[in-house]
């Protein structure tokens, strides 16, 4: 197993080119991944393989994720500066229409969303366009499409856009402060509860660290010891390595669009690390 996990941010819209628009990059990358002969599979399949809870042939595979969970993930929206944007979900639909469903039968995207509606309102006003484009109204439809999983990106991202004190006195703008049970339960277990309440009977089972910040407390104590509370099966970071059997379950690496690659050529180099035949 040697699987690159790619991460996108649908709110990254600073133009309409590959380098400054994650929707444009995502649509192009689907085609490049397919042309390279790789299969796109759900992230939870990768976790199943890692944990030994299921075995599938995952040679030459890639998994796709996106963070922060805005309406841009699911709905086509008209950006006030940069015009109509095809949602990531509809980029998947376009690909399936153009190439046929059988071309990538397991085509899938995992969206990590912020649980707190209040936090999302503040982030929408401060960091997006202030049009209430950070809602949970699309989560159920996205899940029902069968091509999207909705997973846990914390309660409030401990985001600086929120004009309220951080949980348990945490300084905002970082996840490095999540170093005790109170903070971990509030940021992770409470987020599982809130997202699951929207998705029931489906449930979240994967966590993605805000800012990519993991802490030793979370990796070594909270996630391994309190599974009954947080119900997570793995956590994702930004380590820029393919996931292998030796990857750290509570900080699985991902490659981030616009950071670890900025062009199709740079993505190619990441995909080329995936060996043609790796039975390991
Ligand atoms: Zn984030």
Image: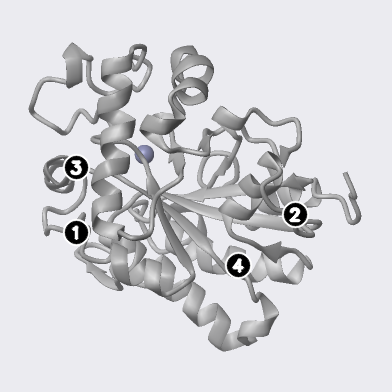
Mark 3 surroundings within 10 Å by alpha-carbon count, few (fewer than 14), some (14 through 19), many (20 or more): some
Q: Which residue is mark 1?
A: 133
Across and down, in percent, residue 115 comes to 25, 44
Sequence-wise, the earlier of marks 2 and 1 is 2
Q: Locate residue 187, reporting x and y percent.
A: 29, 29
Q: Label 4's element?
A: helix
> Which residue is farthest front?
228
Determine the secondary structure under disc 2: loop
Q: Are marks 1 and 3 in contact (CB under 8 Å)?
A: no
Disc 2 versus disc 1: distance between alpha carbons?
38 Å
Res. 210 visible in picture: no
Helix, strand, or loop for circle 3? loop
Please provide percent x and percent y for residue 65. Answer: 50, 52
Give the residue displayed 56% in from the left and 79% down from the top.
95
Q: Which label is found at residue 55?
A: 2
Q: Residue at x 50, y 81 (%)?
A: 94
Residues marked 4 and 1 touching at CB (< 8 Å): no
| Distance from mark 4 CB to nearest ligand 1 atom below 8 Å | no
Q: Is residue 154 left or right of residue 57?
A: left
In terms of image quadrants, where is residue 39? Answer: bottom right
The image shows residue 263, relative to residue 178, as above or below, that is below
Q: CA distance from mark 2 to mark 3?
A: 35 Å
The nearer-to-camera label among 2 and 4 is 2
Q: Give the residue pinned by disc 3.
A: 116
- Marks 3 and 4, how far apart at CA: 31 Å
Q: Is residue 158 depicted above or below 114 in this figure?
A: above
Asked if one can make out residue 268 in the rendered structure from this viewpoint, the answer is yes
Cα distance in 3D space between marks 2 and 4: 25 Å
Please state which of residues 51 and 113 is positioned toward the viewer in this rendering. Answer: 51
Label 4 sits on residue = 30
Q: Earlier in the sequence, mark 3 or mark 4?
A: 4
Front residue of 138/193: it is: 193
């Amino acid at each position: 197993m040697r699987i690159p996990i790619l991460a996108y941010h649908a709110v990254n819209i600073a133009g309409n080119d590959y380098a400054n628009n994650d929707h444009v990059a995502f649509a192009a990358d689907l085609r490049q991944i397919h042309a390279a002969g790789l299969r796109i599979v759900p992230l939870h399949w990768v976790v199943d393989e890692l944990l030994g809870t299921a075995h599938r042939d995952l040679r030459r595979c890639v998994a796709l994720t996106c963070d922060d969970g805005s309406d841009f993930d699911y709905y086509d929206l008209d950006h006030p500066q940069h015009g109509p944007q095809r949602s990531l979900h509809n980029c998947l639909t376009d690909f399936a229409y153009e190439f046929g469903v059988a071309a990538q039968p397991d085509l899938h995207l995992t969206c990590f969303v912020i649980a707190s509606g209040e936090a999302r309102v503040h982030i929408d006003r401060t960091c997006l366009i202030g049009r209430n484009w950070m809602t949970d109204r699309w989560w159920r439809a996205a899940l029902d499409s069968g091509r999207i999983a909705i997973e846990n990106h914390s309660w409030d991202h401990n985001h600086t856009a929120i004009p309220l004190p951080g949980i348990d006195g945490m300084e905002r703008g970082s996840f490095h402060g999540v170093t005790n049970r109170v903070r971990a339960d509030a940021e992770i277990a409470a987020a599982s509860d809130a997202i699951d309440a929207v998705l029931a009977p489906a449930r979240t089972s994967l966590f993605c660290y805000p800012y990519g910040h993991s802490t030793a407390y979370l990796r070594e104590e909270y996630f391994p010891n309190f599974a009954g509370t947080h119900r997570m099966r793995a956590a994702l970071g930004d380590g820029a390595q393919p996931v292998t059997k030796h990857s750290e379950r509570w900080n699985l690496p991902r490659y981030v669009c616009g950071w670890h690659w900025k062009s199709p050529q740079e993505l190619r180099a990441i995909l080329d690390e995936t060996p043609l035949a790796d039975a390991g």
